[in-house]
Amino acid sequence: MIENITVLQEILDDLLLKQTEKYCQGHVADYIPALACIPPQLMGISIATIDGNTIGAGDYRHPFSIQSISKVFGLTLAMNRLGKPLWQRVTMEPSGQAFNSIIQLEWEKGIPKNPMINAGALLVSDVLVSHYSASKLAFVSYLRKLANDESIQVDCEVYQSELSHGNRNAALTYLMKSFNNIEAEVPEVLSHYFTQCAVSMSCKQLSESLLFLANKGIDPKTQSQICSKKDAHRINAILSTSGMYDQSGEFAFSVGLPAKSGVGGGIVAVVPNIGVICAWSPPLNKYGNSVVGMNLIAGLAGKLGLSIY
Amino acid sequence: MIENITVLQEILDDLLLKQTEKYCQGHVADYIPALACIPPQLMGISIATIDGNTIGAGDYRHPFSIQSISKVFGLTLAMNRLGKPLWQRVTMEPSGQAFNSIIQLEWEKGIPKNPMINAGALLVSDVLVSHYSASKLAFVSYLRKLANDESIQVDCEVYQSELSHGNRNAALTYLMKSFNNIEAEVPEVLSHYFTQCAVSMSCKQLSESLLFLANKGIDPKTQSQICSKKDAHRINAILSTSGMYDQSGEFAFSVGLPAKSGVGGGIVAVVPNIGVICAWSPPLNKYGNSVVGMNLIAGLAGKLGLSIY
Amino acid sequence: MIENITVLQEILDDLLLKQTEKYCQGHVADYIPALACIPPQLMGISIATIDGNTIGAGDYRHPFSIQSISKVFGLTLAMNRLGKPLWQRVTMEPSGQAFNSIIQLEWEKGIPKNPMINAGALLVSDVLVSHYSASKLAFVSYLRKLANDESIQVDCEVYQSELSHGNRNAALTYLMKSFNNIEAEVPEVLSHYFTQCAVSMSCKQLSESLLFLANKGIDPKTQSQICSKKDAHRINAILSTSGMYDQSGEFAFSVGLPAKSGVGGGIVAVVPNIGVICAWSPPLNKYGNSVVGMNLIAGLAGKLGLSIY
Amino acid sequence: MIENITVLQEILDDLLLKQTEKYCQGHVADYIPALACIPPQLMGISIATIDGNTIGAGDYRHPFSIQSISKVFGLTLAMNRLGKPLWQRVTMEPSGQAFNSIIQLEWEKGIPKNPMINAGALLVSDVLVSHYSASKLAFVSYLRKLANDESIQVDCEVYQSELSHGNRNAALTYLMKSFNNIEAEVPEVLSHYFTQCAVSMSCKQLSESLLFLANKGIDPKTQSQICSKKDAHRINAILSTSGMYDQSGEFAFSVGLPAKSGVGGGIVAVVPNIGVICAWSPPLNKYGNSVVGMNLIAGLAGKLGLSIY
């Protein structure tokens, strides 16, 4: 992929240039005030490669709210902690987001379809709360270690905002608890979950943090084993079928990379054995995915022929 | 993958040997008499590679009812014929099978989630019926060409059996028609669909027929372009998210290959840029996937490290 | 109720007068051409009493398509024929129409919620087709006997129109058949059902035909027992909870009479121990109930204090 | 109805005698310990008439947990307080309980189908919490006034038990709040709701308290107007279509009286213009209705010909 860094830099700059006006096609998430006020024209992209390079363009060093991208880190931690029993409490089947949420949870008796939908990530949060004495601290430390950057923080305003608009997530968690699939107290689970979501990171930090998924579970920067090779494959598989909300199938169809988006406008995409891409632009399409972010990753994947299929 | 054909042959023989008794863990499909009477202990596996080899073990030359594997061929034909407008009538999002069927179709106002579930394949059949003057004949000719084998036939007993037990498929098709998403007459659509499903092919024929999906759309045997490179990626993407019924997520998670199963006990799996695997054993698990077939493909993929993730 | 016929006649005339312009608030059913062309300004109301009087106003002698009002007659016939076993194939629980139809039928494994929704009436049609050698003829003869009027006819244009727009009803019936809850062939069931719906009757004929429901099962005109006293209570109970589509609860709440509406614009309402009201005006509200018809019955029930609650 | 009190007393005694062993056919509610320990063989029945008599048999003076019967009182209070606007926040359509709960609430965007299902009663609780400075106190005072008995109490053990097993109700309330259909804080709403449910009353107290529903809104004991005549009709209509959980249709069909049951084993039934029956026996059938309670009321209604249809 990265035969010539200068060429790649040009490609990124070029892709970004073509998107300059495209952010107007989306709408910045406005369900909480703290997200609604982000300048919509910010955009960036970065690629971190397993051989040690990171290239970026635009606002790729600008931190943003990672939101649902945190689900990838939470899942990795929970898989490490709980192992196979995790999959008795959440399955790994793809699931339309619109059609799921609380209806599917009721139908499936409190077992979420996968860890990338909210119900599944709330369940993963319950695992972390139940298995760590200070799960929020552990989560942030984990991100700092992966990004090799002690400055990563939770945005308290976003956290508070989420908490006071979290009625649907509360409903999901209480429903799972009514099926005995939540161990901790619901407010604690919600507090952990909203903390996760409220972490701020940049494209650069995110792409570097997730390199282990492109590298058989090993962080190439430190050579430490973040998860097993098999688990890296598994997480990528889940991202491929369920990482882009109700557009997961379309993204697989048209781009062909394991990816996860967040309503903060970020998208990460794993290129197995090569590296990790992260794109960011706040305005979202109707599915909750960044309009420009998707264009950037699709453009890059098309140009470089990165589809895994 | 195929560095040494003798070694691969040994691997296949060995995998098959370990499955000898495992077929007892499943149940042969019995919703129609014509399928119920297949000897459950038959099993086979074959690999066709894009460089021209086919290796097999067990009953890999024994024809069986391809059933839902026919959906892959139907989709390819319809994509060629209709192009982009196809995706206004069926989407490409993954969908739990149990949770879908008629409920999802109603919810989504007659638009099936993807072409691998029954509703989607019935819609594809409608496209074929509407665009070919003799769609059944065209379909069988297509298979014969792809497999380079004029002996391929529709099993009339299976066809009749399906037709007289096809009430649920009739319900799905009439429901889509009530939403104006079926053009032809419903009985014609059903007749085409059941004809597709009733084709008999062997593991060898199936693995060789689908090589174009592992080879950027080109049939390596004839160098003819069966579909575009992009469409080959797209079909593999759909198979990855939706090819194994309600076990699609689990199969991606644990095996990591685009695949399609049928209730006749066959499973095909595409290994991009290498070849196509087909395994067969009639007894099914509760999801409708061949127990031994899944074991064989998982074993081979694990042994050779074939996961695309 | 009918202390003074002259007074009642005045009340009816007065109620009708107040509705003269109100028909504009609704829309004539237009899913089939044969219904769409009915003049919207026609309207009528009649009351038949168990002591032998019938009073009417407006177009109360004008025949119209009885549509779903036919479900009351079909149910009575089927209860007589099948007795208790009927209730193993259809339940008697109320059911929102919008939220039900095919989703509920799937959820409940092919058992319709009650005989007033389409699925339930199709099941009742199956009972009639299976238990009468010529069920359509039997049905029309039954109506002629009840109305004491040999001129009652099936409107062939409406019948043909329904048949060619009957895909959703076909879907419902095939779905029930896939659950083994339909005995006859689906096209036969549909043909009977659409025949029922296509019968033309006037307010006068309908109110007189259903007097047995207000009179403990006995037709006061002939003293013949049409159904048992218990069954008359039961049918009224079903009409009370399920007779007005998704407005059944509201109608019970605001009017308080067992009633059944049809998309032809007719509504019948039973006043136990007193008589039967029938109102007609083609334009429907969003629930499929006649706007003016509801106003007329609500007005009369309010004026005379007819609520059963 | 009550021509001869001695005869009626004999009828009640006789009906009760026939049920002596029947309680074994049900199961006492055991989702909370406080209910599970009630002796299953207790049973009683009482009738209060609008002309001032109360007759009872068996344990008709024994207080029990009124549970969902409290929904009738809550609704009356809320209708008085809020009037018509209440019906923009909850509808009055019947609704299968099993098929509803959280799925229907999601489908209908946070608007419960009627005030007799849990979601609807939680919404009514929100109305009371929002419109009374001390809603729990107001509720209990209201019951004491209606029953003319200052000794009526909330069972604190039941209340605590409900509260700690209330996850599903919490899920329903948070879901409605996410649709902006709950004004107060969710824990407050739940606390009011569980207080309501935890009130203990006897058959005698319940039948006397609800006489206003049989008497056009007027309490015959005090001649005070508890609700309007129209509202009394309306509440009876709602009880008729929705008061007996998923057996509402069957109860209307076979008994024909407006009624409300609770999982404490109590059932009240209104006989318009005559009086109110209350029966009690803890063991429940699969729908959550008292087995013996239903038998007693059905027996009495059949014997005296009380069906309103």
Image (cartoon, coloured by chain):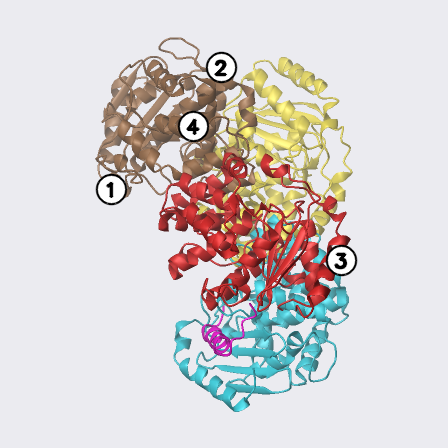
Chain colours: A yellow, B brown, C red, D cyan
**Residue of label 1:** B24
Few, some or many residues within 10 Å of mark 4 (<14, 14–19, 20+)? many
Disc 3 is placed on an element classified as helix
Residue type at tag 2? Ser
**Residue of label 2:** B228
| Gap between marks 4 and 2 measured at Cα | 27 Å
| Gap between marks 2 and 3 measured at Cα | 73 Å
Name the residue nearer the viewer: C71 or B208. Answer: C71
Q: Chain of mark 4?
A: B
Image marks 1 and 2: residues in contact by CB distance under 8 Å: no
Name the residue nearer the viewer: A87 or D138. Answer: D138
Image position of B251 with respect to C90: above or below: above
- Viewer can see residue B94: no
- In the picture, measured across the screen, residue D7 lies left or right of residue C178, that is right
Disc 2 is placed on an element classified as loop
Q: Chain of mark 3?
A: C
Disc 1 is placed on an element classified as helix
**Residue of label 3:** C14
Residue B97 circle label: none
Image position of D68 with respect to C114: above or below: below
Q: Main secondary structure of the magenta part?
A: helix
Few, some or many residues within 10 Å of mark 3 (<14, 14–19, 20+)? few
Residue type at tag 1? Cys
